[in-house]
């Protein structure tokens, strides 16, 4: 006790501040698949997770505006993520390639983390069951998911809500496969649109899993 019988509480307050968990603010391109998957992680510190139905750069702009309005700066422990896909449809689309890369670069320059997939978010789902080493369209991923889970994968809300639990037993394998896949590309090559198949969703999953352990 200090003089006058008062307890020193500064140390306790300091510990509480240090131990405070970061909040996760996740901005998803898709309205159902991605946000419903991440919302099912058993943690309490997902401060914001929403599907906006916006394309790449507008989605990043929404996240930037949110950061500004909520006072999330570089000193904050909070993590802001954008989640979006390339969505290649089999045709040469130079402008879409530029947009994909520019969105990633804009996110990085504004201290926003990115969990992107080329071609589709469903690549992350398929990696729970098998490796993927060749470029495929979304329909191929959907068929592989259906094969592995034993029912039609049509991305409706009912299916999307249960995918976290369905995939959880194989999550470590998916992380390993996604990590191996990313190592097949030159880390210095920042033209991400040419990396297919490619995903960084596992990096967000790893960060969320740390919160479960804590």
Image: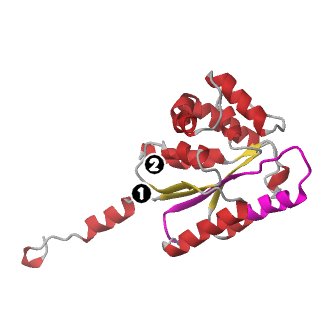
Question: Which residue ends up furthest to the right in the rendered image?
Answer: 92
The residue shown at (43%, 42%) is: 42
- Image x and y of residue 19, in percent: 37, 59
- Element under disc 2: helix
Q: Which residues are magenta?
A: 75-104
The residue shown at (63%, 38%) is: 155
Whether residue 213 is visible, yes or no, is yes
Q: Which mark is residue 21?
A: 1
- Image x and y of residue 148, in percent: 66, 23
Q: Nearer the viewer, residue 130 or 146?
A: 146
The residue shown at (44%, 44%) is: 212
| Residue 172 is a magenta residue | no
Circles 2 and 1, Cβ within 8 Å, touching? The answer is yes
Colour scheme? secondary structure
- Image x and y of residue 169, in percent: 54, 28
Residue identified by numbered label 2: 211
Identify the image quadrant of the N terminus.
bottom left
Question: Which residue ends up furthest to the left in the rendered image?
Answer: 4
Q: Quadrant of residue 213?
A: top left
Q: Which mark is residue 208?
A: none
Crowding at mark 1 (Cα within 10 Å: few <14, some 14-19, many 20+): some
Q: Nearer the viewer, residue 24 or 7?
A: 24
Task: Specify whether 120 is left or right of 174.
Answer: right
| Residue 99 is a magenta residue | yes
């Amino acid at each position: 006790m200090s003089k006058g019988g008062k307890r020193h509480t500064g140390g306790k307050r300091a510990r509480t501040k240090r131990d405070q968990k970061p909040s996760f603010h996740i901005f998803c391109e898709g309205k159902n698949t991605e946000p419903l998957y991440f919302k099912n992680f058993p943690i309490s510190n997902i401060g914001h997770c929403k599907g906006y139905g916006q394309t790449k750069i507008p989605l990043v702009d929404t996240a930037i505006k949110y950061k500004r309005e909520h006072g999330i700066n570089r000193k904050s422990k909070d993590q802001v993520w954008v989640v979006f896909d390339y969505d290649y449809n089999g045709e040469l689309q130079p402008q879409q390639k530029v947009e994909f890369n520019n969105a990633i670069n804009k996110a990085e320059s504004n201290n926003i983390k990115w969990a992107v997939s080329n071609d589709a978010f469903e690549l992350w789902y398929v990696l729970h069951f098998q490796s993927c080493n060749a470029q495929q369209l979304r329909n191929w991923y959907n068929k592989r998911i259906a094969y592995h889970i034993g029912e039609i994968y049509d991305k409706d809300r009912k299916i999307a809500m249960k995918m976290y639990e369905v995939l959880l037993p194989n999550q470590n394998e998916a992380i390993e496969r996604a990590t191996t896949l990313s190592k097949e590309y030159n880390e210095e090559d920042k033209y991400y649109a040419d990396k297919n198949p490619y995903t960084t969703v596992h990096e967000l999953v790893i960060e969320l899993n740390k919160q479960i352990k804590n």
